[in-house]
Structure formats: structure tokens, C-alpha cells
Image (cartoon, helix red, strand yellow):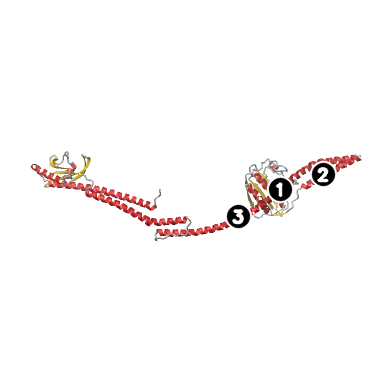
Amino acid sequence: MKPLKLYTRTTILTSAVLTVVLLLFVVFFITKTREMEAQDQEQTAKLWAAQLANLIAYESPPELLQMRLRVISFGQAHEGQIRQIRIYGETKKGLSEQISLSTDEPEEIAPADIATLKRNEPVSRLREIESEQGPETVIYAAAPIFDENKFQGAVSLTTPRVQFSDLSSRIVTLTVALMALAIVSITASLYLLFSQVLYRPVEDLLKLMYEVRTGNLEIEAPMRARDEFGQLAVSFNHMVSRLREMTAERAAYQKRLEERVQEATVELAERNTQLEEANAALFEIQRELTKFERLAASGQMAAQFAHEVGTPLNLISGHVQLLAARTEDQKTRERLELISSQIARIERIVRGMLDATRRPQPQLETTDLTALLQRIFEITAPTLAAHQVELITEFDEKIPAIRGDGEQLQQVFINLINNSLDAMPDGGQLFFTASANNGHVEIVCRDTGEGIGDEIKPHIFDPLFTTKLRGRGSGLGLTVVQQIIREHGGAIEVESGAGQGAEFRIRFPAAETIEPIETGETVEPVFVDANDSFIKTHSGN
């Protein structure tokens, strides 16, 4: 069902309120008319009773017939309007009925009415009687009969109670008709007023708003009059004008934004290219680290081989020399010299293997540790992102330079980063802080990984100690890290607990400080130059 328009609803509501008010007025008018009609009928009944009392003069008993005739003629004059007439005469016992023009049973006048009649005042009231049609309301009236200012008796009559007289009925009918005509006329007038004077400007504004909603901002609302609707039209035009300006500004801003997006896209492409190059460089570094790891493993094996082989060779060489000194047989001495020469040859071969796997001494030079760390972070950024690890750095503004070998220091920090990545398989946070303190530079690497148990922590710097699966690490990474840091005059400490992450604290002397940091430990050289595999854990190296 289509909803009614505003002016139609307003007209219906106003007409309904007006109709209710007029109906209340009609009800009030009819009620008051009925009351006035009842009062008028009572007054008429009193008047008729008084006229009848004046018509009846005091007659002696011989003349009762004449009095009856007068009463009858009076009743015939108001036939249809008077139901009954009774005449009462005063006796010693009170009032007694003398003449009655009614077949109803005699009705005595109430004592209160007698007192009123004796004061020469007529009385009247409404009474309920039983008729052939059922209960009926009639008007009862009584008037006193006086002769020479002496109370002689009373006369009473009864008239029917009529709700409306003919005149009153016509007046009520005319009033109701006029009210209905007024309601119709007022409703029609209100409908025309609301639809033409009030709703038309609103409808025009609604159409203009629909045009604005469809994108047409080149319209203006006409100002028909200098009233509230005119002010509304002016405000609407101002709003549309402002909307046009804002639309133009938005279009210009959108154009600038598109240009910036294009520039950002180009820059992003360049960054992607740089990232690919960095990934390629990282891949090469990983290859080098793998190579170094293999060399470290072979160097460690060579060192162990030299140690294990050197001792029995020394013993054999001693016994050979002892035998050569004691024998006098030339043939035996020649054979012993041949054995001794072969033992010397084996020693040269082992020494050559050790020289081939020995890690070179660091080439110390002034190094900006902050710049070095930043380069390392750029190299490892893709790997950190791939493992969902967030890098958080906090560096002091002024950090002094140190004396160090950039390549070997890079090996140290990449090794620590790799260990942290393996300790956080589901991602986490990696913190790097750098600060200067009492002539030293302190680097702290802390992660939110699995941590290192108390039973494992004392062995993490031991060569070939690892808790990783076979093929995931050789156990030389942190050993090499510790040796490089000590060769730079620094120290490394670790703080960790199972499930609490790990924190490596590294201290280097500043460039103007060349004395190494005392750690209370004897440095055991490990002739390796390698990093552990890219994925490391803090539960072992």
C-alpha cells in the first residue's frame, strides 16, 4: 500500500481533531437543549396549573357541577397535552380530592408540596409512571387555590415529557447539518492549503535533492517568497554550492593521490629490484657460510687427526731413532732411516693440512659498528620477514668506533641472528641495542624464543657441541663467534632460561681503548673459519 503524503495525513489528522471538537460541541448543545426544554415544559406545566387555579373560583358544594364543567372545558382546550387533572379541597383532615379527570388511582399531594402551595407557590417535578407502553417520564405540576387570600385547596395536572419540541428538533437538525457542512468545508480548505501553500515548496526541494543525489550539482532552488521556505531555498543553494566546491577539491585530491600512487608504485618496483639483489647477495653469503662451515668441520677434523696421529708418530719416531742408535747392522740402519723419513713425511702432510684449514688472523681497522649492523639488518630483512620475526633496534646517538675486521664481525652477528630465527619457529621479536659505556661498546641481542636450559648453557661455546638434528648444524658456530670476539679484545655473555628467550651481551673496546676485556678464561684457538647453518637454535650451537 502506497503511503499517504504528508499534507494528506496532516489534513486527515486536523479534520479528525476538528470533527471531535465539533461533535463534543453538538453533544453539549443537544444536552443543554434538552435541559432547557425540560425547564420550559416544567414552567409551562406550572403556568397551566396556575391558570386552572385562577379559572376555578371557590364554589360551594351545590355548584360543584359548574366547577366540573369549567375544568372539563380547560382540559379539552389542552387536549393531548394534559394527561390528568385533579382538584383538591381543604378539609379539617387536610386536602381531599373533589374532581378528577383521570381514571388513575387518586394521588395525594406530598406534605412538602402542601407547605409550598400554602405559601402561594406552584410546584412541579418529573415523575416516573407506568403506562401501557411501559415506564414513562411525565411532568407533575400543582398550584394553590386562594379566595380572598385564604387557601381553599389545590389543583394538579400531569403532562407528558417531550424530549424536543418541534422547534427544538428543527434547531438541532439544522445545527448538525451546519456542523457537517463546516467539517467538509474546513477539510477541503485545509487540503488545498496544505497541498498548495505548504507542500508544493517541500515537493520542489525533494525533487532538487533527488537531482543532487544523482550527481547533478548545477541546479538551484527557486525562492518563491521571503518566508521560511525562502530561507530554506537559500540555505539549500548555499549547500549545493559548497558541495560543488568540495567535489572539485576531492577530484583534485584524487588526481594528486593517483599521481602519488604511481610514484609509490615505481619506487616499490625499485625497492623490489633492490630486494631481489639483496636476496641474491644473501644467497651468496649463505653459500659462503656453508663453505666456511664445511671448512670449519674439516679443520676441526684435521686438528683432531693431527693430535691423534701426532702422538703415536712421535712415539714411533723415538723408538726408530733409539733402534738406529743401538744397531750396528748397516742394512737394518738403512731400513730404520727409511722408516724415519716416512714418519717425517707424514708429519709434513699433517702440518700442511692444518695450514690449509687455519682461519686467518683478523685484519683490524677502524670500524663503525652502527653502520655495520645496519648493513646486516638490510641483508637479513627478507629472512626475518619470511620467519615472521619483528626486528626492534635501539641505538645510542653517539657510539664510538671500534678496531675490528668487518667480515669476521659480520659473521658473528649473522650467526647470532640465525640462532634467534631457529629459536622462534612460529615468529616473535628480535631486539638489538647498542650503547657506549666506560670506553666500551656494548651490543645486546635478545629474542623471544625457546631459550636455553640451565643444563645446556655451560656447553654452548664448546666445539662440536650441538643439540640439533643431524645435518642441521656442526656445533662450531658459537665456538667461532666466541673466538672472533676474543681476538677483537671483546667478551660475550649469555643469559637465558628454558622458555624465556635468550640474551647475548657482547662488549668491544672502543677504538681509543686497545686493552682486551678480562674474562678470566684462557682462549683455546680453534683453527676454523666458518659459520653455522642459516637456521640455529639457542639450545645448542
Q: Residue at (35%, 51%) from the top-left corner?
A: 12
Task: Please state which amino acid type lies under the numbered disc 1.
Answer: Leu
Residue 181 location in percent, x, y?
A: 29, 52
User: Which residue is under mark 2?
Assistant: 347
User: What secondary structure is found at the residue carrying circle 2?
Assistant: helix
Instruction: Please rate how many residues cluster around mark 2, counting C-alpha atoms within 10 Å: few if below 14, some from 14 to 19, many from 20.
Output: some
Residue 462 location in percent, x, y?
A: 72, 43
The one of 68 and 230 positioned closer to us in this rendering: 230
| Quarter holding residue 501 | top right
| Quarter holding residue 113 | top left
Between label 2 and label 3, give the one nearer the viewer: 3
User: Which residue is under mark 3?
Assistant: 265
Task: Please state which amino acid type lies under the numbered disc 2.
Answer: Glu
The one of 424 and 75 positioned closer to us in this rendering: 75
User: What secondary structure is found at the residue carrying circle 1?
Assistant: helix
- Work out whether residue 269 can be spotted: yes
Residue 239 location in percent, x, y?
A: 46, 58
Q: Does the CB distance between marks 3 and 1 fall below 8 Å?
A: no
Residue 448 location in percent, x, y?
A: 63, 45
Instruction: Please rate how many residues cluster around mark 1, counting C-alpha atoms within 10 Å: few if below 14, some from 14 to 19, many from 20.
Output: many
The one of 67 and 525 positioned closer to us in this rendering: 67
Separation of residues labelled 3 and 1 (CA atoms):
35 Å
Separation of residues labelled 2 and 3 (CA atoms):
64 Å
User: Which residue is under mark 1?
Assistant: 289
